[in-house]
Amino acid sequence: MRARANVYLVGTGPGDPELLTLRALKVMQRADVVLYDHLVSAAVLELLPRRAELVYVGKVRASHTLRQEEINALLVRHARAGRCVVRLKGGDPFVFGRGGEEMEALAAHGIACEVVPGVTAALGAAACAGIPLTHRDHAQACVFVTGNLRDGSMDLDWRALARPRQTIVVYMGLTGLPRLCAGLVGHGLPPTTPAALVQQATLPAQRVVVGSLASLPALAARLAPQAPTLVIVGEVVRVREHLDRLIAEPVAATAALAAG
Ligand SMILES: C[S@@+](CC[C@H](N)C(=O)[O-])C[C@H]1O[C@@H](n2cnc3c(N)ncnc32)[C@H](O)[C@@H]1O
């Protein structure tokens, strides 16, 4: 028989609280203590019970409130005290979310945890920007990559990325955007390949900037998008052009700032 969990690693989705799963909401309502990241939206935190103790452990680029080891230790300490511990993470805990590391740290202390999946930012951004990640006419594959590695470098498998009929979604890609676009062009993708940058997907400040591998870095530099942002590269971005006026509110309401 499986051990009963009193620690929950919960994905809260890209920001809009209506994108929480029912399971996430149920678990949140049971929480004694909640450890949450900077990507967990205020609207999601409002759904927590008043009695829950809230601990901010957020990590923003180059500014970590707590080191990962300290977060792991906190999870273990609260779980050992017999409290119902809810660890809230933006998006999904297992997509660039260090959910695996926290699960392993708990397991090393014999503590069971349940992982509650969330809508990862790529899915939220694609839906609200009206960009299908796969499409029979344009892309048969979709890859999620991070533009930000442990040591700050961008050591991507460029040849594997620069394939035709593939959509690339780049998490944490804004800082390295010029390098990313140049790398893809340098490895064979046409400079005219459509590319979009989605700012704060599913949140009130959502914004979509559309360009190409050649034009997106300059557009981004000019428009100074606010984090978090996600980059989508591939022919699927063109689909948005046909759909733009026909998509219902959440997508139509986004500001398309440029086409290039
Ligand atoms: C550390 S990763 C966490 C990803 C998260 N676990 C997920 O599944 O979406 C943080 C990055 O996710 C992306 N991201 C998260 N929420 C976003 C949002 N609402 N809009 C755009 N990008 C978002 C950004 O690229 C951000 O830098």
Image: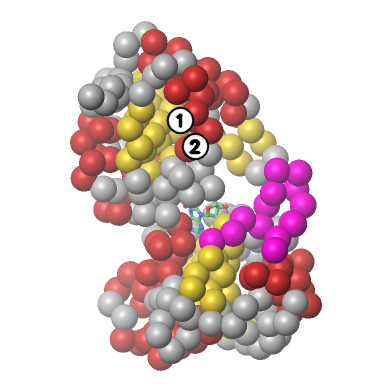
Q: Magenta segment, principal secondary structure?
A: loop
Q: Is residue 99 left or right of residue 158?
A: left
Q: Is residue 100 left or right of residue 151?
A: left
| Count of numbered labels shown in the rendering | 2
Residue type at tag 2: Gly
Q: Position of residue 211 (x, y in %)?
A: 61, 81
Q: Which residue is mark 2?
A: 100
Mark 1 Cα shell of 10 Å, populated few (<14), some (14-19), many (≥20): many
Do callouts 2 and 1 mark residues in contact (Cβ within 8 Å)? yes
Element on which disc 2 rests: helix
Q: Which residues are magenta?
A: 144-157
Q: Which residue is mark 1?
A: 103
Q: Residue at x 36, y 77 (%)?
A: 252
Q: Which image quarter: residue 178?
A: bottom right
Q: Is residue 46 above or below residue 236?
A: above
Front residue (pair 224, 67): 67
Q: Is residue 59 above or below residue 144?
A: above
Front residue (pair 111, 147): 111
